[in-house]
Amino acid sequence: GAVVSQHPSRVICKSGTSVKIECRSLDFQATTMFWYRQFPKKSLMLMATSNEGSKATYEQGVEKDKFLINHASLTLSTLTVTSAHPEDSSFYICSARLPRDISYEQYFGPGTRLTVT
Amino acid sequence: AQSVAQPEDQVNVAEGNPLTVKCTYSVSGNPYLFWYVQYPNRGLQFLLKYITGDNLVKGSYGFEAEFNKSQTSFHLKKPSALVSDSALYFCAVRDIPSGAGSYQLTFGKGTKLSVIP
């Protein structure tokens, strides 16, 4: 149980275009999902916390107008990178938490490799 | 604020030998501690967690971790390393949200484990 999927696994886009990444909880409902960015050989940087039915909470320094997050249902959160530039190239990982899990363990998706040319 | 330190960027161990990946933490209150593993171009996989109870926690793939409150450590161990254990390992601590925010995980920078045949 507690499987999280991401789509696509890899995407290449041209500079100036927008890209949408989907994160789905396959066998549970996730009221809270998280979006991370990981640079090569670096730890995970939390970008935002996505709450179903409300606005996402962005971490300091993350541009909310550039990284649009929508959590419209209990099993789907999307991250849209708008007007992508080469510096946005990175590995994006989402995670989800089981409701009422007092340990607050997170279940991670397989990640999406974004390359902006 | 909560923090996690993984003092070693890389750990090399011979196959069949015991391995240890170090983690120390700083939290206010009771710590909720986690270990995750990441294989290349993949998301994070849960290994084990400490919430309360026995200080020795057993997890997936033969890994275990020992919670040491006096030393504020949560080192990951395995009695006999396998080549397939080679991966990036992250220690994490549950953060305490500010205001009405959601509980998050704070990750260490990661330790690359290489098991040499």
Image: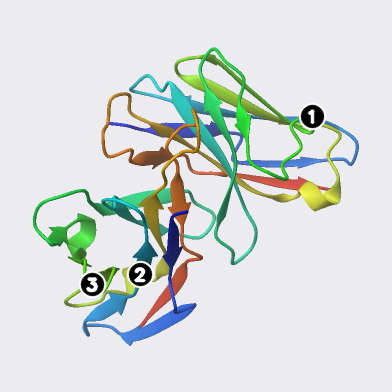
Q: x, y percentage for residue B110?
A: 47, 66
Mark 3 vs mark 1: tell me if same chain.
no
What amino acid is labelled 3 in the image?
Lys
Quick check: marks 3 and 1 in contact, CB under 8 Å? no
Assess disc 3: are there few (<14), some (14-19) or many (≥20) residues with their C-alpha within 10 Å of its C-alpha. Answer: some
Quarter of the picture containing the C terminus of chain B is bottom left
Residue A33 is tagged as none
**Which residue is rendered at x = 43% and y = 63% of the image?**
B4
Image vertical order of residue B100 relative to residue B89, above or below: above
Residue B77 is tagged as 3
Residue on which disc 2 sits = B24
Q: Judge from the rendering whether residue B33 lies leftward or rightward of residue A50; answer left or right.
A: left
Q: Judge from the rendering whether residue B48 lies leftward or rightward of residue A77; answer left or right.
A: left
SS for tag 3? strand
Tell which subunit mark 3 falls on.
Answer: B
Label 3, label 1: how far apart the Cα atoms are: 43 Å
Q: Nearer the viewer, residue B83 or B27?
A: B27
Residue on which disc 1 sits = A65
Tell which subunit mark 2 falls on.
Answer: B
What amino acid is labelled 1 in the image?
Asp
SS for tag 2? strand
Image vertical order of residue A2 relative to residue B90, above or below: above
Mark 2 vs mark 1: tell me if same chain.
no
Quick check: marks 2 and 1 in contact, CB under 8 Å? no
Image vertical order of residue A80 relative to residue B23, above or below: above
Mark 2 vs mark 3: tell me if same chain.
yes
Label 2, label 3: how far apart the Cα atoms are: 14 Å
Tell which subunit mark 1 falls on.
Answer: A
What amino acid is labelled 2 in the image?
Thr
Disc nearest the viewer among 2 and 3:
2
